[in-house]
Amino acid sequence: MKNFDYLEPTSVAEACALLKQHGGDAKVFAGGAHLTILMKQGLYQPKALVNIKKIPELKRLTFDSAEGLLIGALVTHRELETSALVKEKLPVLCEAEREVANIRVRHMGTVGGNLASGEPLTDLAQIFIALDGKLKIMGPSGQRTIPVEELFLDFYTTSLAEDEIITQVVLPPLPLKSAIEYIRFSSSSVVDKPSAGVAVWLSLDEEAVRVARIVLGCVGPTPVRARKAEVSITSKKLTAERIAEAAATASQECSPGGDLRGSEQYKRAIVRTLVKRALAAAYQSIL
C-alpha cells in the first residue's frame, strides 16, 4: 500500500472542497469495509483519504412525519440492525441487516459507503429502491436529490461525481394497506454475499394491487426493477397463478452472469422462486 495524505474535515462542505482540490486522486473514507480491501489489493492507490467520520450530521438516524426515515451516510449496518426506531418504522431493514456479512463488518461498514461503492452483490439497494428511496448528495455546487435507482450505472460505478458525498438516505413513510418483503439467497453460507436478493413493495386498493415494485439485486451490474412483472399484477387481485406468471416474467428481466455462486440459468430460477415467495408474503401481510 502506497503512502497517502490523511485528511479529517469537520463539515460536509469542507470534505467536498478537499475532494475537489485533489481531483480524482482522493477517496472518501467512511467505514472502510470496502475501500481498505481494494487499497490492499492495489486496485485503488489514492494520494489522499478524506475521512468523514468526524462530521456529526452524517451519523443521524431520525424519523420525520413528512419525509420518513432519515438515515445518515455514516450510520452503520449494525446500527440499522439494532435500532428501535428502525424496528418500529421499517423492520424489514433490521431483518435484512442481520444477514449482511459478519458482525465485525456490520460494525464497520456504513450505509453511505455501501451505496457509494456501487457493489452489485448487496442487500440495501434493492430495499431502498422498492421503497422509492431518495439520496441527498452534497458537492461543491450544493445539494442535489436523486432516486436511489439513479445512483447505479454499472459494476462498481455510480453517478456520484469525484467531489460529491452521499449525506442521507430518505425513505418515505409506508402508506396504509402497503407492505414490503425482502428475501435473499446465498449459495454457501449466511455471511456470504447473496446470489440473488428480491425486494417487493405492494400497495393495495381493496384487494387489488394499486402499486407494485419488484426490485432484483445481485443478478446484474446494478439493481433492476422488474417493470413488466409489476405491470402484469397492477390493478389485479393476486392469485397463485398471477404470482407465478409475474415471477416467471421477473426472472427474464435481469441479466445474471455465471460465477461461483451459480450459472445464469440457476440464478434465474432463484429469482423466480424469490419473487414468488416475496409477492405472496407481502400480499398476505396486507390482507
Image (cartoon, helix red, strand yellow):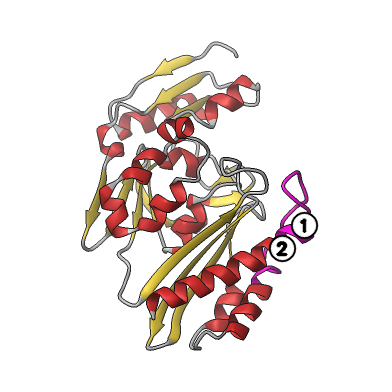
Name the residue nearer the viewer: 286 or 203. Answer: 286
- Please report the residue visible at 68 percent of the width from the left and 61 percent of the height from the top: 270
In the image, the segment drawn in magenta is: 250-267
Disc 2 versus disc 1: distance between alpha carbons? 6 Å
Quarter of the image for residue 190 reads: top right
The amino acid type of the residue labelled 2 equals Arg
Q: Is residue 157 left or right of residue 282?
A: right
- Please report the residue visible at 50 percent of the width from the left and 46 percent of the height from the top: 99
Residue 35 percent coordinates (x, y): 53, 29
Residue occupying the far top of the picture: 3
Q: On the rendered image, what quadrant is the N terminus found in? A: top right
Residue 108 percent coordinates (x, y): 43, 30
Residue 157 percent coordinates (x, y): 59, 44
Q: On the rendered image, what quadrant is the C terminus found in? A: bottom left
Q: Is residue 99 above or below residue 240?
A: above
Q: Is residue 83 left or right of residue 127?
A: left
The amino acid type of the residue labelled 1 equals Glu
Are the residues tagged 2 and 1 within 8 Å (C-beta)? yes
**For the stretch drawn in magenta, what is the main secondary structure?**
loop
Q: Is residue 226 visible?
A: no
- Please report the residue visible at 37 percent of the width from the left and 41 percent of the height from the top: 73
Quarter of the image for residue 16 reads: top left
Q: Is residue 224 left or right of residue 12?
A: right
Query: Would you name the residue on which mark 1 appears?
Result: 264
Query: Would you name the residue on which mark 2 appears?
Result: 268
